Image (tube, grey):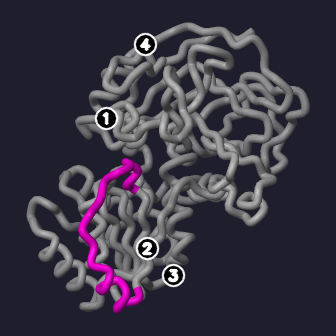
């Protein structure tokens, strides 16, 4: 038996409750993870607000939120000996893993679209008042189901740096791969939170000629420059969408951006971002996960300029392995430690969420 705490999430905008629960056993193929660090992602904040309804994805309450994490193997179920790259697993091995699970046999999985699995399940959707209890990252343990993809964290990559790999970093890597960002292209990143900063770093590594970051928080704009942005646009100084689109054209030889990445999470950013695109530009939509929000749209300007919009939800699980390689190779050139500058004990989860809601931290983290 394995006993540990969970931060139970009962209803939106209600305090989390710390509860001690017991997992009877680790079943065949399962892996019990001891959570080392779990970040508070924007989607966790949206779920807490009730604007991103886990129930809409088949989830149930009460549950345990948290998905962007790094952990160590606490127990291996029968039949599990290696990670998804064939590296040996043993108790204490540090690992990361996608927080969603594909069946590997449906038509989408067989077509290479595992992030669109017809039988997809994920963290934060199961009930926390019945076994296995450890169904999200905000707890002492997290139970990986049988067949889950899991990767060993290199010894050279710290917990602080690895924690963001399985959501924010892999998501933007996958998005830029989907639109095939090319060497020498111009890129705009709308929003310089954690996803935006990772997107800047990945775009720079892929050889983007000019990276323009847009945000309204001074610290994030400074961080954007440190992560590789060539130009920053302050929403407080350039106050209208028309002015910001003009500024983007100024910094892209008058043509606009080849790729725009939206990680603001507000629909009003989409119309503005589309105006920043060049002809044949590609728009990567990641941030808007709240159902039912809309924006005005003139399709003729989209059609006449041959623009493309790509919606990105989750990522192919194999991307996570590449994300670890990216962190290992670039960690000394990037201030990755500043992404998780604020850490809170699990017992202080309510204070951590208050800080995340107020955007006082780029990424608040919980350490059980």
- The residue lying toward the viewer, choosing from 113 and 250, is 113
Judging by the rendered image, the residue that carries numbered circle 3 is 182
- The residue shown at (74%, 66%) is 111
Query: In the rendering, which numbered label is found on residue 356?
Result: 1
Quote the CA–CA distance across marks 2 and 1.
Answer: 29 Å
Mark nearer the N terminus (2 vs 3): 3
Instruction: Point out the tag, 2 or 1, that comes first from the N-terminus.
Output: 2
In this rendering, the label closer to the viewer, 2 or 4: 2
- Which range of residues does the magenta coloring cover? 287-306
Q: Which residue is mark 4?
A: 17
- Residue 72: image location, x then y, percent: 67, 29
- Dots 3 and 1: beta carbons under 8 Å? no
Above or below, 195 against 245 in this view is above
- Asked if marks 4 and 3 touch (Cβ < 8 Å), the reply is no
Q: Tell me what residue is drawn at x 16 percent, y 71 percent.
A: 241
Relative to 128, residue 202 above or below? below
Discs 4, 1 touching: Cβ within 8 Å: no
Q: 55 or 10, which is in the foreground?
A: 55
Seen in the picture, residue 92 relative to 197 is either above or below; the reply is: above
**On the picture, is 335 further left or further right than 88?**
left
Which of pointers 4 and 3 indicates the residue nearer the eye? 4
Q: Which residue is mark 2?
A: 309
């Amino acid at each position: 038996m394995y006993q540990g705490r969970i931060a139970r999430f009962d209803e939106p905008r209600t305090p989390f409750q710390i509860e001690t629960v017991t997992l009877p056993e680790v079943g065949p193929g399962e892996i019990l993870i001891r959570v080392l660090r779990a970040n508070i992602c924007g989607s966790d904040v949206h779920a807490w607000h009730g604007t991103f309804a886990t129930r809409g994805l088949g989830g149930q309450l009460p549950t345990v939120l948290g998905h962007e994490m790094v952990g160590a193997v606490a127990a291996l179920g029968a039949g599990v000996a290696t990670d998804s790259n064939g590296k040996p697993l043993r108790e204490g091995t540090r690992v990361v893993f996608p927080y969603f699970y594909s069946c590997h046999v449906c038509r989408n999985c067989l077509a290479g679209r595992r992030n669109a699995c017809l039988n997809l399940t994920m963290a934060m959707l199961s009930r926390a008042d019945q076994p296995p209890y450890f169904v999200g990252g905000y707890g002492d343990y997290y139970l990986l189901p049988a067949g889950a993809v899991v990767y060993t964290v290199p010894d050279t990559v710290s917990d602080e740096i690895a924690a963001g790999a399985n959501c924010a970093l892999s998501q933007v890597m996958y998005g830029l791969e989907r639109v095939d960002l090319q060497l020498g292209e111009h890129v705009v990143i709308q929003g310089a939170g954690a996803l935006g900063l990772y997107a800047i770093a990945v775009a720079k590594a892929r050889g983007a000629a000019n990276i323009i970051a847009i945000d309204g928080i001074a610290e994030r704009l400074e961080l954007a420059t440190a992560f590789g942005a060539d130009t920053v646009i302050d929403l407080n100084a350039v106050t209208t969408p028309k002015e910001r689109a003009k500024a983007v054209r100024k910094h892209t030889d008058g043509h606009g951006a080849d790729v725009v990445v939206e990680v603001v999470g507000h629909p009003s950013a989409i119309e503005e971002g589309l105006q920043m695109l060049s002809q044949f530009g590609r728009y990567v939509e990641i941030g808007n996960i709240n159902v039912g929000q809309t924006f005005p749209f003139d399709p003729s300007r989209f059609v006449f300029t041959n623009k493309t919009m790509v919606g990105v939800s989750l990522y192919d699980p194999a991307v996570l392995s590449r994300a670890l390689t990216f962190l290992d190779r670039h960690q000394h050139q990037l201030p990755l430690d500043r992404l998780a500058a604020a850490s809170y004990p699990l017992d202080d989860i309510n204070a951590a969420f208050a800080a995340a809601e107020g955007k006082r931290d780029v990424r608040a983290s919980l350490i059980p």
